[in-house]
Amino acid sequence: MMNTNSPNKILKELQPEKDFFIGIDSDGCVFDTMEIKHKECFIPNNIKYWNLQAVSKYARDAAEFVNLYSRWRGINRFPALVMGLDLLRDWEDVQKRKISIPDVPEVRAFIDSGRPLSNPSLDEYIAEKGETEELARAREWSHAVNQTVDDMVSGIPPFPYVRESLEKLQDTADMLVVSATPGDALNKEWSENNIDHFVRVIAGQEMGSKKEHLALAAGKKYKEGRVLMIGDAPGDMNAAKANNALFYPIMPGEEDMSWQRFYEEAADVFIRGDYAGSYEEELISEFLDHLPETPPWKK
């Protein structure tokens, strides 16, 4: 297993060793870490660094909706922050509090810059554009999140049937971690559970987006129908479809069942070439039914 922050070199030059390729998301997919990371690590830092104390209840609800319970589940931290702030600004109950919700135009510009949305990339962006109060706060916030995650999140094993699935496919498929989580956190989680040896590369946010991970590592290297992405968020599905890959959803709230179904059924369907079509379509329809687009306070 290799890890580096040079995606164009390592991922692009990665050559097939098996006939099949499987990309696997980590947070909320392999590990039951989404709830603790967002509720105990991200959201308290959102409130602290973006001065949301006066609307903390609403800030928590907005962030939980974006990051855990909606079609945007699993998106990168920077656009998730912006989306949560936008939901707050548009929320009638928040407007009654008459406090200023940050508009963060410079964070938006960073998001639109086309760079990897990571802390090292933000450091480079600040070095080029100049340090402003807003960008400095974004950097401090993001580093604080990482520190809180490092302090808080440990001892969380993979979901049942993850290890069994990796063992089942290790001789059949090249496997890669495809994640928007910082690489250090990924390496810690995969190594402390002794499952890092099943994957060839652990690709985190420093290596680009999930779409880029799949394009570089698997693009045009495998026969059609032999590339699969496993994930728990629509962003994982979109990354797969952008690369003409198949998608297996881990259903939020039903992760144990999803992995058992993958181990006992879906993995075999994929390997024998019967996954594309109605089988995948039914799984995706079930998956999207779990994740609404409209916040509950707008219904």
Image (tube, rainbow, N blue to C red):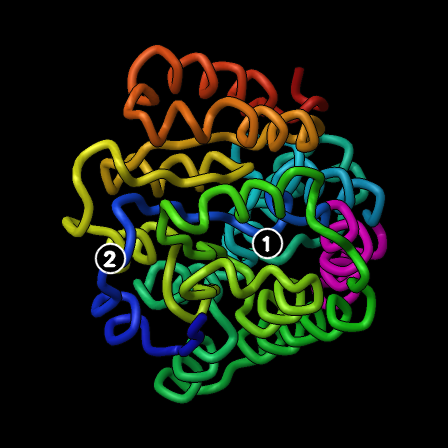
Point out the image quarter for the N terminus. bottom left
Q: Is residue 287 above or below residue 209?
A: above
Q: Nearer the viewer, residue 291 or 228?
A: 228
Q: Which of 153 and 109 is in front in this view?
A: 153
Of label 2 and label 1, which has the lower sequence position?
2
Q: Is residue 258 left or right of residue 193?
A: left
Whether the magenta-drawn stretch holds residue 50 is answered as: yes
Tell me the residue that label 2 is attached to.
16
Assess whether residue 66 is covered by the magenta stretch: no
Which residue position is annotated with label 1? 81
Q: Which amino acid does label 2 sit on?
A: Pro
Q: Can residue 106 be seen in this view?
A: no
Residue at 39% from the left image edge and 45% from the top image edge: 22
Please give left or right for residue 175 compared with residue 184 in the image. Answer: left
Q: Position of residue 244 (x, y in %)?
A: 23, 36
Q: Is any atom of residue 294 visible in this view?
A: yes
Q: Which amino acid does label 1 sit on?
A: Leu
Q: Which of marks 2 and 1 is in front?
A: 2
Magenta stretch: dominant secondary structure? helix
Q: Quadrant of residue 281?
A: top left
Q: Residues within 10 Å of mark 1 (few under 14, many from 20)?
A: many
Q: Provide the residue span drawn in magenta.
A: 35-54
Image vertical order of residue 262 relative to residue 10, above or below: above
Q: Which element is circle 2 on? A: loop
Please tell me whether residue 87 is drawn above or below residue 101 in the rendered image: above
- Give me the residue at 60% from left, 60% from top: 195
Is 112 on the left-hand or right-hand side of 257? left
In three-dimensional space, the C-alpha distance between marks 2 and 1, rounded to whole angstroms, equals 37 Å
